Amino acid sequence: MGSQHVTKRNPWAWVPSLYFAQGMPYVVVMTVSVIMYKRMGISNTDIALYTSWLYLPWVIKPLWSPLVDLLKTKRLWIVATQFVVGVALAMVALTIPMSTFFQYTLAILWLMAFSSATHDIAADGFYMLGLEQHQQAAFVGVRSTFYRVAMMTGQGILVVVAGQFETSSGGNIAFAWSVTFGILAALFLLFFIYHKFILPYPAADKPTINDGSRSVLQEFFRVFALFFKKKNIVVTLFFLLFYRFAEAQLVKLVSPFLLDVREKGGLGLTTSEVGVVYGTVGIIALTLGGLLGGFVASKKGLKFWLWPMVLAIHLPDAMFIYLSQVQPTNFYFINAAIALEQFGYGFGFTAYMLYMIMISEGDHKTAHYAICTGFMALGMMLPGMLSGWLQEQIGYQHFFLWVMASTIPGFIVAALVKIDPEFGKKKAA
């Protein structure tokens, strides 16, 4: 009863769980669904095309982010969207055994993606309202760590669990994945209950709608207009869309490549092995790469580290050329190859994140950063949609050669951007 009056609470009670809950639906929609559909016999063409459409809510997230500000409290949005995500996961679990599971589960995952994208907006806003400024800085590492832990849980532990259920049920893949999504649903409904009681009630967390709603609408369009009036905006948009052109195609086919039988050009790993390689070892390497990227950028700035980061995100993609040509059987070597590629991705992605922060500087920082993340999602969605079809036309060996050629736009846009030499450096005390 007293929780109604708690305006502040120890951040450790809610920041880790909030950002774990933010990361989980994203990794389920983006990665776990790919592995599930592959195990359920869906073609690479359909997997890449339809799961790439699931990026759309994150692409258009900036369009409805003002509504989260205007209507109700961020706290209410968080709790409501967690409930919707939990129900959606339960519905996926129930529809997997159906003959028309592909259509049903895709529709439900799309609903879940919209809820998750809305949850992102509310959670990021609530973080700023619920913490003092010094706490926001102190907990930024905790945020990203628990988001990564969610990715490791989804891509790693859950996929391993699904693999174990596949084995113990005598190869009943639909049953195994239905149970796995059921566990996820239960987890999310626990998050809903926990946050309903534990999240504080910051005094500043209130809807901003008022009688001057027309001026709010005008302000909304003005914020967008100001973003597109920024200096060198065309180059900025090209960078946001093409820096990860190769990675957008690669990420959709990594799991299918690891799972596909050797006769089809894959590595023939089991579901549980993919959970270890890509979902555990890979995510640890990705996290370490990101941490190192952030650390070195704070020392010498983004401009100094831009080209090492461009090389790091693109050149390790060549590991997949080797894996597809040689098809090694050594499990430790496969782990090392994936770890190298993911470490490079984590290190190189730091440049992208810092660039988005840099160009969002000034008035309307939050809204402009949200617009950047929309273009970021679009840059992943469009190339990803066709990647499965292309792979099925030319095979894994030629596909990974194409991915390597697709890194060229990333180098071109990196050469065009202008970076403030001081940006990213930690200021001397």
Image: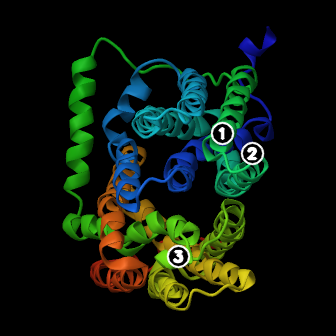
Residue 204 seen anywhere in this rendered image of the structure: no
Quadrant housing the N terminus: top right
Q: Which label number is shown at residue 76?
A: none
Q: Secondary structure at mark 3?
A: loop
Of residues 411 and 354, the one drawn nearer to the viewer in this rendering: 411
Mark drawn on residue 266: 3
- Circle 3: is it few (<14), some (14-19), or many (20+) Cα within 10 Å? many
Depth-wise, is mark 2 or mark 3 nearer the camera?
Answer: 2
Q: Nearer the viewer, residue 295 or 314?
A: 314
User: What is the basis of the colouring in this image?
Assistant: rainbow
Q: Is residue 348 left or right of residue 14?
A: left
| Side of 340 relative to 216 (left or right) | right
Q: Identify residue type, mark 1.
A: Phe
Residue 101, position in %: x, y?
47, 36
Q: CA distance from mark 3 to mark 1?
A: 25 Å
Q: What's the mark number on residue 175? A: 1
